Amino acid sequence: MGVTQDLSFVQLISHASVLVQLVMGLLLLVSLMSWWYIFLKMFAIRDEARLTAEFEEAFWHNQNLNELYKYANSSSLREQGALERIFAAGFAEFLKLKKQQGVDADAVTEGSRRAMRATYQREMDRLESHLAFLASVGSVSPYVGLFGTVWGIMNAFRGLANVGQATLAHVAPGIAEALVATAMGLFAAIPAVLAYNRYAHDINRLSTRFDSFTEEFSNVLQRQP
Amino acid sequence: MSATAYYEPYRLPAGILALLVHSVFFALLYLGLSWNRQAYLPPTMSVELWPSIPEEVVAPPVNPKIEAMQPPQKKMAEPDIAIPDKKKVAAKPEKKPDLKPVEVVKPKPKTDTQKPVEQKPDTRVADQQAASIQAERIKQEEQAAAKNKMVDEYKAKIMAKIRRNVVMPPDVANNARAEFLVTLLPGGAVLKTELKKSSGNAAYDNAVERAILKSDPLPLPPDAQLFNRFRELNLVFRPTE
C-alpha cells in the first residue's frame, strides 16, 4: 500500500474485503429490483389512471349500461382497467340477481355492491403489489450498506495495527472502499423511498375514485327498472 | 392470489430501464470517480540530526591550503595573534590527524601525506603560508565580529519585542530581575520558556513569561547559520529597562 494509491472506482470495489463485496453485490441486486419495480409500477399506475379516466368518461356519457358491459367484456386484458372490471363484476351480479324471481330490489343492489367490493379489493391488491418491497428497500438498504461500511472500516483499522507507523495513507483506501457500500445502500434507498411515497399517494387517489364510482354505480343500479 | 400471478404488461421495458439507470449510474461513477490519478508527493526534506550543537560551523576545505588553516580557527578566541604563528607551522603535522574525524569533508589522504615533507625544509613557503594564515585569520575575525554584531542586534530586537509586550503588574520593585531560558525553533517560534531565576515577584515573572509567549515568533537573523546562537536564549528582564 504505497503513497501512490490509484483510487479508481473499479479498484475501490475489487480491493474491498469479501463481506463488503457481498454486501455491495446484494445491494446492487436490491437496487436493480427496486428500480425494476419502480418502472413497472410507474407504467402500471400511469395506465391505470388513464384507463380509469377513459372509463369514467364513457360511463357518464353513455347511459346504455348493457352496451358498456358488452364492451368491457370484449376488451382485451390490457385495455381493461380496474374500474372497468369493477363495473363488469357489479353489473354481472346485478343481471344474475335480476333474472331470479322473488329477490327484492335492495338485495339486488346489495349483492352487486358486494361483488364490486370483492373486485375492488382484488384490484387494489394488484395495484399495491411490490410497494411493500420498495418500502423495505427504502428503510433497510441504508443499514445493510452501513453494515458493510462498518465491517470494512473495522478491517482497515485492524490492518493499521500491524503497521509500525500509522499514517492516514494506510487507512484511507480501506475506508474509501468501505464507504462505497454506504453509497450503494443510499443509491438503492433514496429512489425506493421516493417512489414508494409517490405511488402510495397515487394508489390512494385511485382507490378513492374507485370507491366513489362504486357508490354512484350502486345508485344507478337502484334506479334501474 | 399471489402477487406474481397478476398480469403485468411492462415487465421487459421496466427491466431494461432499470438496467439502463444502473449502467448510467455506474458509468458516471467510473468516469467521475478517478481521484488521485497523479499521486501527491510531498516535497522531500532532509533533516540532519546532530547529537550536540557545534560551536562554529567548520567550512569544508576547498583546497589543502585552507584546510591547513583549520587549526588557527580553533584558537580564535585567544587574544594574541602573533605568538601562535611558528608553533602552528611546526605543530601542523601532529595536529592534523586529530582533526580529521572532526571535519565534515574528509581531506584527501594523498595531499596530507605530502605536505609535511615539503613544508619543513622550505622556510619561504612556511613564511608565505604564515602570512596567508594571518590574512585569513583577520578575515575570519572580521566575519566573526560581524556575526557577533548581528547576534547582538537580534538579541536586542528580541528583548525589545518582548519588553513591548510586558504588561507591568503593580508594585514591582525596581531591582527585580527575572531570568528566563527561552528555547526557540528555527523560524523564531517559542518552543518553551523556563524561569531560571525568579524576580521574587510572581506577578512580574508571569507577566514576562506571557510577554515572551505573546511575542512569538521572535525576530531571528536571516542567516540560518546563526540560529545555533539563538536556539537557547538566556534573557534577563528588569522592570526599569
Image (tube, coloured by chain):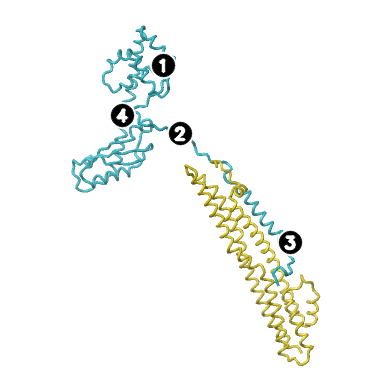
Q: Earlier in the sequence, mark 4 or mark 2?
A: 2
Q: Residue at x 65, y 71 (%)?
A: A202
- Residue B46: which disc? 2
Locate residue B128: give its quadrant.
top left
Do the residues indicated by labels 2 and 3 lie within the same chain of the protein?
A: yes
Which quadrant is the N terminus of chain B positioned in? bottom right
- Give the percent coordinates (x, y) of residue B40: 53, 41
* Kind of residue at disc 1: Pro
Q: Earlier in the sequence, mark 2 or mark 1?
A: 2
Q: What is the C-alpha distance between the residues marked 2 and 3?
A: 65 Å
Label 4: which residue?
B149
Q: Earlier in the sequence, mark 2 or mark 3?
A: 3
- Give the percent coordinates (x, y) of residue A71: 80, 77
Q: Earlier in the sequence, mark 3 or mark 4?
A: 3
Q: Colour of chain B?
A: cyan
Label 3 SS: helix
Label 4 SS: helix
Give the camera-side residue of A38 and A224. Answer: A38
Give the camera-side residue of A69 and B212. Answer: A69
Q: Earlier in the sequence, mark 4 or mark 1?
A: 1
Disc 2 crowd, CA 10 A, few/some/many (<14, 14-19, 20+): few
Q: What is the C-alpha distance between the residues marked 4 and 1?
A: 31 Å
